[in-house]
Amino acid sequence: MVNKIGILPRVEHLLDAMPTSACILTPDLQIVAVNENFLIMTSKQRAEVIGYNVCEVWPESPAGAEALRISVAAVMHSKKPHRMPITRWDGQFDQSGDFEHYWQVLNSPVFNEYGEVDCILQTSENVTDTVLAKKAASETARRIDVKIEELQVSEKNLETARALESAAKQDLCDFIMQAPMPMCIIMGSDFHYTLANPAHDRLVNRKAMGKFLADVFTETERLYHFPILKRVLETGEPYVGNELPLPLIDDDGSLKEHYTNLSFTPLRDADGKIRGILGLAHDVTEMVVARRKLETLTADLKAAVEAAESANEAKSAFLANMSHELRTPMTAILGFTEVLRDRGVTEEDKHDALQRIDSGGRALLRLIDDILDISRIEAGKLTLEKSVFAPFEVVSEAAAVVRHAAEQKGIELRLEFDPDVPLSACSDPARIRQILTNVLGNAVKFTSSGEVRIRARLDKPLHLIFDITDTGIGISQENQGRLFQRFAQADASIARQFGGSGLGLMLSRRLCEELGGNLVLVDSKLNKGSTFRVRIEAAPFDLESSHLKQASPQRLPAMDEQEQSLTGMRILVAEDTYSNQVLMHRFLSVAGADVDLASNGEEAMEKAQTELYDVILMDIQMPKMDGIQATKALRLNGYRGPILAITAHAMKEEIERSFDAGYNDHLTKPINAKTLVEAVSIYRSRTAPFNYRGQESHRI
């Protein structure tokens, strides 16, 4: 129903724009929405009608209860509008009954997203002017006929009869011209206007009386009504039409469409010969436009509901799949932790358990990183770090990540480089490596035998092309359109059989676009394989003539060298989670540091102001006083020592917030021993100047 999808205020606003009484009914005649004209006609308040049966609210309705039920049933069955017969109903307009009011009720279907009739739009149009005009014209014509018959026209009194007929016709003309009635014309059989009242001239924006049809309307304007007029004159059959289009040229020369309810009735002389046409019309343009707006709104809402439902279904499927992807490595981590608690576990099993815990943790971290990358891209906050790199090395590194999985499945992993691939290029090598790892990983995942091949080539002058081809399961035509959608995999069964979050390809495409390229499916055949193409804007680069920084692998000293690198340093770790306290205490003390602990920002402030530390490692989210507050307070009190954020907050705005508060660097959890020791060892010299806005690069 209309109110079920939350658009009732918008529908009522649109109904209020309609010039007629209007309401929306359920198939069982319950009122869902009404406009102000409906409330005026029924003398009711909105709260007195919404939710009630229209026959109870308005028992004296011009539609009539039984006739209304029959009309609504006809609409539900035919799915077409049904116009009820014109009915007299004076209502509150004239309680004395001295003046007549006539109404015509139109019931129109409103469809739901499944193409079924969901509710009924009922409009009640006041057609009093049209009915009274027809009555007056009919009565005048009847009087003329009676008087002519009474005269028993003969040769000697023919002149008197003609004079009487002329006077009677003048009476009719005077009535038509002066009475407050709809558009009215009298036209001869030669299409010459004998009469056109002011309402007609106002609509067409020109004078018509005394002119021929061809002089009043252009050829375009005559196209629709001329054939109707001609047919009435030829057949003698009256014509009645509702909501007929009447195209009229405005003052600015543009063609504007109007709509009219009209009737053409042939006028006959005493011998029954057709001499002309009486035309009556009522302008219903506003009503038609308002109803079409409602129909458009209904269609738009239908599309919006379908899109929302589709998005919700995709999101629900994604969340269910994401839960699976999170729980799978978590199960391994927790399960093999239990194995390590067993005192009887062998060294070999212990080593295997540690490897599996490490693998599960890294899988979780990759999943979190993918989600964060998507959030950064959609927020427009993804930072690219362009530098000079070797394409061969980046491809080799991406291949190395998936090589073990390929070997386990017996799949050959082949790397091919065209001769035109440059030794060096300029782009973001880390993001290119991420893209290639994702696409190669997919290729290996969905291939059970055969090979996965990556071919690198140069598309001159500015793009590197990487074609990744596999001999896997392929993708059907039906599912290819879902490949790069958010929260989606090609098929729900894919997630069940092969796993995966459904984020990889979508994220890779977005990263390609950020790098000035794209990611497309070039070809795919079921059970034969697929080819994906990665295009990156990465121009060849001449290292000798450039001052740009060259990307090179960051090599940390071996752990046996680092173990003594913090000797003599005193470090305060402010961390509220006990397990993280134990972990960082171990990493730092093994490297030779003297470690002190604090459980919140308040305790860390007190220790920093009474003890001497070479470095403070400060978590951000802590009880009592968080790390941001503690760091700001220390800086305001003149503390100049290095403070490093070590936190699970990894978004760019969180990093900026850390530096704004006075942190020297921002380390993101989870963190390994090598990275932690390296970050702390930078601050061995207490005489080194400290920049509270951070270093040139930070670790995330």
Image: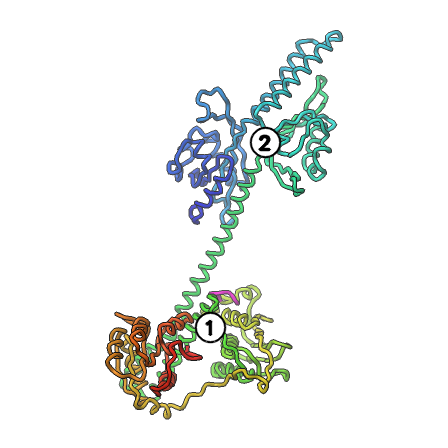
Please name the residue shown 44% across and 63% down the image: 317
Q: 503 or 101, which is in the foreground?
A: 101
Q: What is the magenta segment's predominant secondary structure?
A: loop
Q: Quadrant of residue 197?
A: top right
CA separation, marks 2 and 1?
Answer: 67 Å
Residue found at the far top of this picture = 156
Q: Is residue 237 left or right of residue 374?
A: right
What range of the chain is rendered magenta? 484-488
Give the tally of numbered discs. 2
Residue under label 1, please give it. Answer: 498
Which of labels 2 and 1 is toward the front?
2
Type of amino acid under label 2: His
Is residue 97 a member of the stretch shown in magenta?
A: no
Q: 138 or 659, which is in the foreground?
A: 659
Is residue 486 a member of the stretch shown in magenta?
A: yes
Q: Where is residue 398 in the image (x, y as percent from the top left)?
A: 51, 81
Circles 2 and 1: CB atoms closer than 8 Å = no
